[in-house]
Image (cartoon, rainbow, N blue to C red):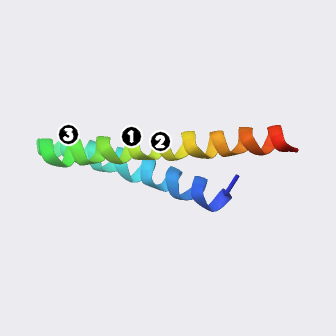
Amino acid sequence: MSTQDRVEATKSNIEGKAQEAMGEITGDPQDKAKGEAKQEKAKAQHAVEDAKDKVKQALD
């Protein structure tokens, strides 16, 4: 598990939520979509880190 990678994924998720909310407030669908995409990328990063953890646990 890379703590730094998890921190980056969490940061990206928070940024995505903020950007999506700003898109909602301003009525900018492009900004909202970019925020949603950041959140999906963060979910994928967390899934990769979870998989790494499982492999590491299996090898230990």
Q: In screen coordinates, is 48 left or right of 35?
A: right
Q: Amino acid at mark 1?
A: Glu
Q: In this rendering, which labeled residue sits more in front, label 1 or label 3?
A: 1
Q: How many marks?
A: 3
Up-down relation of residue 4 to residue 28 (above or below): below
Dot 2 or dot 3: first in sequence order is 3
Up-down relation of residue 29 to residue 6 (above or below): above
Q: Residues within 10 Å of mark 2 (few under 14, many from 20)?
A: few
What x and y, as percent, mark residue 28?
A: 12, 45
Q: In screen coordinates, is 28 left or right of 40?
A: left
Q: Amino acid at mark 3?
A: Glu
Q: Secondary structure at mark 3?
A: helix
Q: Amino acid at mark 2?
A: Ala
Q: In screen coordinates, is 12 left or right of 37?
A: right
Q: In screen coordinates, is 40 left or right of 20?
A: right
Residue under the image location 20 percent in, 39 percent down: 24
Q: Which residue is mark 3?
A: 24
Q: Which residue is mark 1?
A: 40
Residue under the image location 88 percent in, 44 percent down: 60
Residue lying at the far bottom of the rendered structure: 4
Distance Cα–Cα, label 2 vs label 1: 6 Å
* Disc number placed over residue 44 in the picture, else none: 2
Q: Of 18 and 38, which appears nearest the observer?
A: 38
Q: Secondary structure at mark 1?
A: helix
